[in-house]
Image (spheres, helix red, strand yellow):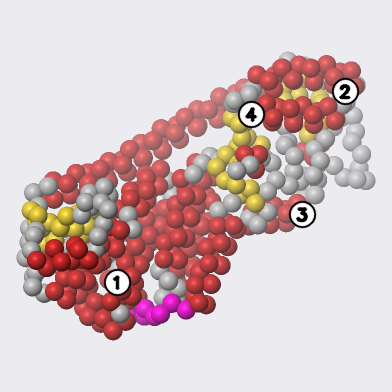
Amino acid sequence: MNWNEVMYMSLLQMSFLGTVIILLIVVLRAVLINRLPKKTFLILWWIALIRLLVPFSIKSVTSIYSLLQSIYSDINPVRTAQTTTFLPIHGNMPEIANGLSEAMVQRTESISILSVIWLAGLLLCFGFFAVSYIKCYREFRFSLPVENDILEAWKEKHPLKRSLSIRQTETIAAPLSYGVIRPVILMPKNTEWKNIYQLRYVLEHEYVHIRRLDMLTKLIMIAAVCIHWFNPLVWVMYILFNRDLELSCDETVVRRFGMDIKSVYATALISMEEKKSGLTPLCNSFSKNAIEERIRAIMKIKKTSKFAVMISAVLVIGVTGGFATSASSLEKNTETAQENGETTVALNEVNIREDEPLSSSDVEWWTAEEYAKWLDEEKEVLQSMIGEKAYTGGDGWFVWTQEKVDETIALYEDNL
């Protein structure tokens, strides 16, 4: 990966870009949920999840934000000039310096308060899921293992590298699965073990969850929700992602057993839904609240066509390249440096018209000797900043490296 093309991002940037992808998926899902393979939407949700959790983004010319930046460049050519020319301004500026100091203090205080609020929300959100987990753990720890010929035969046909156990308890009314390293399929105590037809659908559904590590997916989803608890669309993603995990499992089961079992499987699903009880956010339950959506989806399952696969691939590539990446830089860094009461500003930050030249009241010009003296001091300042994090409108968040310092100094020398 070329780290020069990576943009470090703040929490709000991550949340905003994730929100854009979530909105897009919600629209695509509403239109295409029964027309494309359900795995398509799982992949799209993962793209949104990664965008919410990874604190950097790769710049790309295919990004929708590059297009928006290009349009903005056409509208405001001066503000997005390709070449940045620096105009040093000097003089004693105690009032400006004091104003900047006060503004920085106020901004630091605001950021501190917001950080405390965000942390409090994160802890509350984490506490909610932790309490749910503890509640489930207490209920499930007294479950008993189940062994019979039917289950032994089923296990032989469904090998798993991890240790899979089937248990039963009287604390639940519908089957569910949980666990990552040692997964468990938990069945109600009143399960009709002789009802082989319904039993095989239930076990197959939970087996698909376990084999695809859906429990791990749920944990990562919960992490995203806790971090972005302030973003309502992240909660929407959590709900719809969970629904699509179930829809995808339903689709996989139907395809494995054949299209002629759709009605029987839907009937079994309704039966399980009627018995559902309790909140189990850290488990894969056989049924979810959106029962009507699941029944509709089951009855509309068709053989996957090449056209549907092609459309799915185009959507995944398009969302990744267009919305999961950031805008490629159309401009050089716009820097503002202040040292010993001296300040430099970029020429493209000054509102200039070609037919209206700058007056002496707009800019106070340095001589080459004054600029050279300032540059010598600035080199020391830049060297001391190596390793620190900074932000510019062109590059976003980045970390000062020797390469970045040399590049900036070369730009200053070109101006000289």
Residue assigned mark 2: 366
Residue assigned mark 3: 75
- Of the 4 image quadrants, the one containing the C terminus is top right
Badge 3 marks a residue whose secondary structure is: helix
Among the two numbered marks 3 and 2 on one chain, the one whose residue lies closer to the N terminus: 3
- Where is residue 39 shown, x and y percent of the image? 41, 66
The answer to whether any part of residue 91 appears in the image is no
Residue range in magenta is 299-305
Residue assigned mark 4: 400
Residue type at mark 2 is Trp
Label 2 vs label 1: CA separation? 75 Å
Label 2 vs label 4: CA separation? 27 Å
Residue type at mark 4 is Trp
Mark 3–mark 1 CB contact (< 8 Å): no
- Taking 9 as reference, is 189 above or below it? below
Label 3 vs label 2: CA separation? 31 Å
Q: Nearer the viewer, mark 3 or mark 1?
A: 1
Out of 229 and 362, give the one closest to the viewer: 229
Mark 2–mark 4 CB contact (< 8 Å): no
- Where is residue 159 shown, x and y percent of the image? 25, 60
Disc 4 packing (10 Å; few <14; some 14–19; many ≥20): some
Residue assigned mark 1: 253
